[in-house]
Amino acid sequence: MKRLLLGTGALVALANPATAADLYTKAPAPVMPPPFSWTGFYVGPNIGASWEYFDIADTLTGLTFGSGTRSAFVGGGQVGFNYQVSPFFVLGVEGFFDGIASNNSTRPGVVIPGVGLVTASVQPDWVSTLSGRIGFTGPGFDHWLFYVKGGGGWIQASATINAPFATFSESRTISGWIGGGGIEWAFAPNWTARIDYQYIGLQSTTVAPGFLVDTFTISSANVQTLTVGANYLFNWGTTAPVVSRY
C-alpha cells in the first residue's frame, strides 16, 4: 500500500507542471504614475491686499507732506509660461496685472510762503509687473513648486495738489523693479493654486502744477502685494523628466 501511494504521488507531480517555486512567484511591481509636469502656458485670477508707501515733498521749500503706509484691496490676474528643465528646476516668465481699490488719502498740509496751506496726495490705481521665475520641485513633491522671481514693475498713480485758490490732479505711470516669490500647488491635472508676494520699488518722479511756480517730488515709493490665486495650466500632456527610483 505504501508503494502504491508513493507511485500515485509521483504521477500527480509529473502531470502537474506547477512546482513549489511557482507558488512563491513575486507579484508584478506596481506601476508608478508619471511625475507631474509644470511645462506649459498658464492663466488665472488672483485677489489679495497691497501696502503702499509714498513720500511727497515740496521741491522749492523742501517741506514734506508726510509719509506712511496704507493698505488696500487688489484683484486681477496673471499669465505666464513654465519650462521644466530637469526633475528639480522650472524656469518661467510671468505677466501680472491688478487693480488697486484704495481711497485717495490726503497727507497733512504744509504752509508754502506766498501761497498758503497746500495739501497733496497720491492714489495708486493699478499695478503691473513682468518677471522671470526660477522654481524648485522634485520627485516625492512634484505637485509643489517653490519659486522666486524678479523683473520690472509699473504703477499707475494719480497725484492731487490742493492750494487755496485751485486744485491740480495728474495721472502718470511710475516704473521700478520687483522682487518676490511664492508657492504653487497642483491639485488637479491642469489646475494649480498659489500664494504670491511682490515688492515693487519705484523711481522718484515730479509733479508740476501749472498754477504754482513749483514742483512736488514723489520719492521713496514702493508697493507690496500679497495675493492668492488659481491657474489653468495648458501642460500639453507632457510629463516631467524621469529619474530612477531604485
Image (spheres, rainbow, N blue to C red):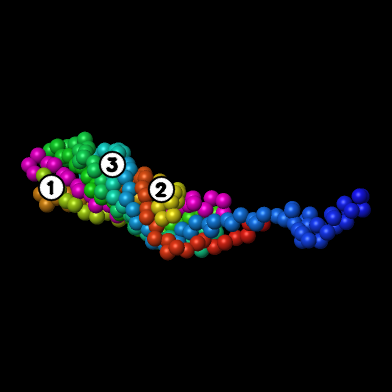
**Image point 29% across, 38% down: which residue?**
70
Q: Is residue 63 visible?
A: no
Secondary element at image label 2: strand
> Viewed as shown, does residue 174 lie left or right of 178?
left
The answer for how far apart the CA atoms under marks 2 and 3 are is 18 Å
> Viewed as shown, does residue 74 lie left or right of 146?
left
Q: Are marks 2 and 3 in contact (CB under 8 Å)?
A: no
**Image point 42% across, 64% down: which residue?**
236
> Viewed as shown, does residue 149 lie left or right of 17?
left
Q: Is residue 227 visible?
A: yes
Q: Which residues are magenta?
A: 139-166
What numbered label is drawn on residue 194?
2
In the rendered image of this protein, does residue 107 appear above or below residue 218? above
**Image point 10% across, 49% down: which residue?**
211
The answer for how far apart the CA atoms under marks 2 and 1 are is 41 Å
Secondary element at image label 3: strand
Q: Amino acid at mark 2?
A: Arg
Dot 2, how many residues are within 10 Å of its Cα: few (below 14), some (14-19), or many (20+)?
Answer: some
- Tell me the residue that label 1 is attached to: 168
Which residue reaches farthest top? 108
Dot 1, how many residues are within 10 Å of its Cα: few (below 14), some (14-19), or many (20+)?
Answer: some
Residue 91's x, y, as percent?
46, 60
Secondary element at image label 1: strand
Q: Is residue 160 magenta?
A: yes
